[in-house]
Image (cartoon, rainbow, N blue to C red):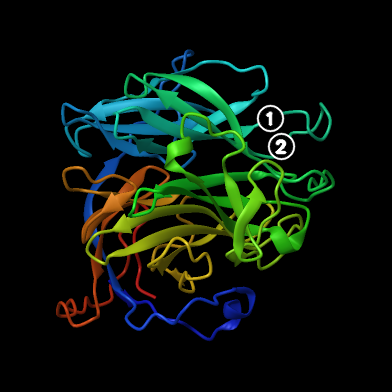
């Protein structure tokens, strides 16, 4: 199946804020059926195998092994020579405790530094924010560092959270009363900054959606107070308690029963397109029912409004959460991929995703005739 991605004029455009320069050559994206593969679920101390409940970052070690971190309330680690031969099940990693960090922790992003230290960022859900009897939480984002390829982690503390007064404890939302979370992190091509693509669930509707923050790579070891959110055309809003301008605003307030919004961005740099690619979930109600998986492109991370209008991938609309691309080549991860990669959703992949340029550098791919999805599993369909 092949879709041409371009600016569109249907009603959702009204809700998007895209003020960057016009992109003259949007890529073609092709999805191909491929042999099923799954990332490794985590084995906890009770013997239970967990499903995958977040973005799952990947890194290569110095021996040429691929390491994948998956999470469900806590992070787990699997390793293997490639994406198709990972250890199973994934085993828990150790995060040194901090008195100021309580609640579940999900590792959603990693970065390998030049000195081979591994850095990571986690989605944290503190309890008791809306009273001890409430299940509601408000996520925030913390930083980690490891000297042993992610087996054990030093907790560097919280680097991104929501402003005071932004909780809505009377929300209709099933999970969140506010917060910043469900994110990914990717470096720019100059390796000067790390960009955080975050989901925002504030009380204020104008600040709900997908926003961006950044920090200098030189601040990795002392990150508290060094992350800055994008606001009013500049990178001056503090990561801790700062306000945001959103790149992709919510369609309908997250705190209403009929909420409708993009969330959970996963971003990689595509070496074939020479462009950044973002995948997004889209929730259609208070229970976060998945309406679809969307894709967007941007050549410059320093332009938060340079992203193309998201286009829906032709995948069964009830497919699970956390879509992401993981590259297949040596050194490729969830942050860098080439023309052909694997498309995952909740750690499951039935598809190859192939990116085609349309700037006269390659011929368009052949048209694939429409067909019915296979029975018995979630499969791609043609719109």
Precedes in sequence: disc 1 or disc 2? 1
Query: Horizontally, is 346 left or right of 240 in the view?
Result: left
Residue 291: image x %, image y %?
54, 62
Give the answer, above or below, for where 251 lies relative to 321.
below
Farthest top residue in view: 45
Q: How many marks?
A: 2
Query: Camera-side residue: 4 or 188?
Result: 188
Residue 227: image x %, image y %?
57, 43
Residue 124: image x %, image y %?
60, 33
The answer to whether the residues at label 1 and label 2 have Cβ atoms under 8 Å apart is yes
Give the answer, above or below, for where 334 lies relative to 75.
below
Crowd tier of the residue under label 2, counting other residues whose Cα lies within 10 Å: few below 14, some 14–19, many 20 or above: many
Query: Camera-side residue: 110 or 88?
Result: 110
Query: Camera-side residue: 307 or 51?
Result: 307
The residue drawn where x is 44% and y is 15% is 47
Query: Horizontally, is 325 left or right of 317 in the view?
Result: left
For the residues labelled 1 and 2, the Cα–Cα distance comes to: 6 Å
- Give the SS element for disc 1: loop
The residue drawn where x is 35% and y is 73% is 382
Residue 288 in sight in this render: no
Which residue carries the number 1 mark? 126
Give the answer, above or below, for where 272 lies relative to 367.
above
Give the answer, above or below, for where 246 lies relative to 376.
below
Query: Horizontally, is 129 left or right of 184 in the view?
Result: right
Q: Quadrant of residue 379?
A: bottom left
Crowd tier of the residue under label 1, counting other residues whose Cα lies within 10 Å: few below 14, some 14–19, many 20 or above: some
Query: Mark number for residue 245?
Result: none
Query: Mark number for residue 137?
Result: 2
Farthest front residue in view: 218
């Amino acid at each position: 199946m092949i879709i041409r991605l371009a600016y569109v004029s249907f009603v959702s455009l009204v809700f998007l804020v895209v003020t960057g320069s016009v992109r003259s050559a949007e890529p073609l994206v092709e999805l191909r059926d491929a042999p099923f593969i799954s990332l490794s679920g985590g084995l906890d101390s009770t013997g239970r195998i967990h499903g995958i409940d977040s973005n799952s970052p990947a890194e290569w070690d110095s021996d040429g092994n691929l390491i994948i971190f998956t999470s469900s309330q806590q992070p787990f680690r699997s390793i293997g020579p490639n994406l198709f031969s990972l250890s199973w099940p994934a085993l828990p990693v150790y995060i040194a405790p901090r008195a100021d960090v309580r609640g579940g922790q999900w590792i959603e992003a990693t970065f390998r530094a030049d000195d081979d230290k591994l850095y990571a960022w986690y989605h944290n859900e503190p309890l008791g924010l809306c009273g001890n009897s409430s299940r509601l939480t408000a996520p925030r984002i913390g930083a980690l560092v490891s000297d042993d390829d992610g087996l054990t982690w030093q907790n560097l503390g919280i680097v991104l959270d929501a402003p005071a007064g932004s909780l809505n404890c009377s929300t209709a939302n099933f999970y969140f009363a506010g917060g910043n979370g469900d994110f990914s992190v990717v470096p720019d091509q100059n390796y000067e900054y790390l960009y955080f693509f975050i989901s925002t669930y504030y009380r204020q509707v104008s600040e709900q959606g997908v926003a961006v923050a950044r920090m200098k790579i030189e601040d990795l070891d002392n990150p508290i107070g060094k992350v800055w959110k994008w606001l009013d055309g500049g990178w001056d809003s503090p990561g801790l308690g700062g306000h945001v301008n959103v790149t992709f605003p919510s369609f309908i307030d997250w705190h209403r029963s009929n909420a409708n919004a993009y969330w959970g961005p996963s971003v990689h740099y595509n070496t074939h397109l020479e462009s950044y690619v973002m995948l997004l979930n889209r929730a259609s109600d208070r229970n976060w029912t998945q309406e679809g998986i969307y894709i967007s492109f941007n050549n410059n991370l320093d332009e938060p409004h340079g992203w193309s209008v998201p286009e829906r991938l032709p995948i069964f609309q009830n497919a699970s959460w956390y879509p992401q691309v993981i590259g297949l080549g040596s050194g490729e991860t969830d942050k860098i991929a080439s023309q052909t990669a694997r498309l995952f959703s909740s750690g499951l992949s039935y598809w190859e995703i192939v990116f085609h340029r349309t700037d006269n550098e390659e011929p368009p791919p052949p048209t694939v005739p429409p067909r019915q999805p296979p029975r018995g599993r979630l499969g791609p369909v043609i719109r």
